[in-house]
Amino acid sequence: MNIAKFRQAIKPWMLPIAMLIGVLFHDSIHLVAFLSPYLIFIMLLVTFCRIRPEEFHIGRFIWILLFIQIFGAVAAYMAIAPFNSDIAQGAFICVFCPTATAAPVITGMLGGSITLLATYSLISNISVAILAPALLTIIGAHSDMSFLDSTVTISMRVLPLILAPLALAFMMRAWTPRVHKFIANRQSLSFYLWAVALIIVVGNAVSFIMKEPSDRIPEMICIAIVSLIVCCAQFYIGRRVGRKYGDKISGAQGLGQKNTVLAIWLALTYLNPIASVGPAAYVAWQNTINSMQLYFKARSTTKI
């Protein structure tokens, strides 16, 4: 088996392997955790080099996805809160959390629109930065930060990771076209960078859950199960909505693939800390779904 065939065979299994490594070595992940934003920056730069500035368009499809994200989160909270407020907060943050900055990478591999997902990821993250302080305060925040401080803090954690590689990709297109073309032709690199970043994300999530007190295990299990239901529902609804607009992959990834690192931070900062188990479990659920999608995509491509 040559290198190309080996890479094709191993690719669908890269995400499960990365998740397993993150679980096994979670105690040591903190040593390399600082690499995460740099990995995300580079893989987004590689992905964004495939985008043309004139392709950006905020259409009805994006507004519908955003409506589902915001109002779906409120609906999930209101439906569960009468029974258990902590589980309701976990469900809320798993829906309300913005699209992952790396979602365009997986979307491109699955054959969806990178431009649409990059646009929605930007709009989604900006919306959360603006709405999070108010909504999280209403449902029971305990943060001492002011509304303005919260908005600025969230924005500074999220927007540079999206805007900086996007701006750099556009500048290279205009000023250094040869370098831009070279990077644009190396799209497979972003996938392997994402696998490394996933090791860090999973390791951090496992370390966080392991630190929770044992007497909260039953409640944490309930939150994790609700997180699974929410994850599957968002991928399904996104796919159904996307089918109507001719891009079911972008719809599914836009709603289903979440910025779980930000979600965990939001839950720890504004909600009952145990609610952060929801997005921590969501890491496993969404990447299991992504792995299955990549597997079936690779299998169908091989048959063709």
Image (spheres, rainbow, N blue to C red):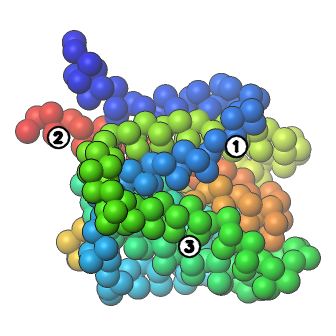
In the picture, the disc for residue 125 is 3
Q: Is residue 196 above or below residue 139?
A: above
259 on left or right of 118 = right
Q: Nearer the viewer, mark 2 or mark 1?
A: 1
Quadrant (top left, top right, bottom left, bottom right) of the N terminus: top left
Q: Nearer the viewer, mark 3 or mark 2?
A: 3
Q: Which residue is mark 2?
A: 300
Q: Nearer the viewer, mark 3 or mark 1?
A: 1
Mark closest to the chain's N terminus, 3 or 1: 1
Give the image location of residue 143, x and y in percent.
87, 74
Q: Residue pushed farthest right? A: 144
Measured in 3D between alpha carbons, the distance from the residue under mark 3 to the one under mark 1, in whole angstroms, is: 22 Å
Q: Residue at x 74, y 32 (%)?
A: 31
Label 3–label 2 contact, CB within 8 A: no
Measured in 3D between alpha carbons, the distance from the residue under mark 3 to the one under mark 2, in whole angstroms, is: 33 Å
Q: Considering the numbered disc 1 on the image, is that residue within a helix, a strand or a loop?
A: helix
Q: Residue at x 64, y 31 (%)?
A: 23
